[in-house]
Image (cartoon, rainbow, N blue to C red):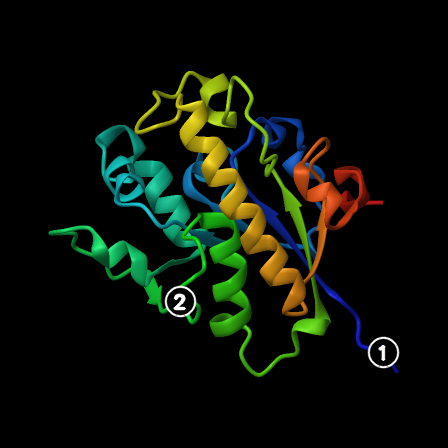
Amino acid sequence: MASKLNKILVLGNSPHINEIDFDLIDPRIKTIGVNRIWLKHYPNYFFFNDVPILNELDLPEHKISKIKLIQNSICYSSQWIRKSPGVAIPNWVRIYPISDRTFFPDSVSNSIKIFKDQIIRGSSISDYVFYIAGVNLNWSDPSHFWKTMGYPSRGNHNNQVWYERRFNAMLSNFIKLKDSGVNMVSVTPGSRLNKIMRYENISNLYIK
């Protein structure tokens, strides 16, 4: 008898996140969220690669959000975060190695790769299907869901040229994941991912 697939909703940070009704997501579906997803949803698994996320969570105005995130999420990162000089990794963050040094260190594809290689060790990846939300890989303005919330931009979040190069590297990562046997479905309308994987509407993951 075929095993029942474990459905994982992976949440990027594109404006598509604003279209998701998180109250309607089937409770049997686990979520992996990255970067500033905590402004909208506390996922089962939280991944980030950048020190600025830690710095923002340490701001006084985000004290309650940080507490809720730690209470609700398994928080993890990759060895890439150790490349930042002087960074102190808090004990609520698990650090995992990246097995493929050619893998571009974006948060979404890395969260899936580490989940596959480290967190579900002992289980078959064929027992999982990952639904990718909030990953467009096309430039837009606003570029992130949190910009529509009035959240201040940090870093290169308005640099279209920088992001377009990054999008190409991210797409290459997703192709590598697909070639390694990761079953992925895009639920982001208009995404470049829809050319390399099946697309479904996010409502298919809502409570029936």
**Residue at figure coordinates x 68%, y 43% from the top left:** 193
Which of disc 2 and disc 1 is earlier in sequence? 1
Q: Viewed as shown, does residue 125 lie left or right of 5? A: left
Picture quadrant of residue 66: top left
Judged from the image, the secondary structure of the residue bearing numbered disc 2 is loop
Q: Position of residue 30 (x, y in %)?
A: 62, 56
- Quarter of the image that includes the C terminus: top right
- Quarter of the image that includes the N terminus: bottom right
- The label on residue 2 is 1
Q: Disc 1 or disc 2, which is closer to the eye?
A: 2
Along the viewing direction, whichever of 146 and 162 lies nearer the viewer: 162
Q: Position of residue 69 (x, y in %)?
A: 40, 47
Q: Amino acid at mark 2?
A: Ile
Disc 1 to disc 2, C-alpha distance: 31 Å
**Residue at figure coordinates x 52%, y 47% from the top left:** 170
Placement of 131 over or under 121, stated as above or below: above
Along the viewing direction, whichever of 196 and 64 lies nearer the viewer: 196
Judged from the image, the secondary structure of the residue bearing numbered disc 1 is loop
Decide if residue 31 is in sight here: no
Q: Position of residue 205 (x, y in %)?
A: 76, 46
- The label on residue 98 is 2
The 10 Å Cα crowd at callout 2, few under 14, some 14 to 19, many 20 or more, is some
Q: Amino acid at mark 1?
A: Ala
- The label on residue 16 is none
Q: Residue furthest left?
A: 86
| Tally of numbered discs | 2
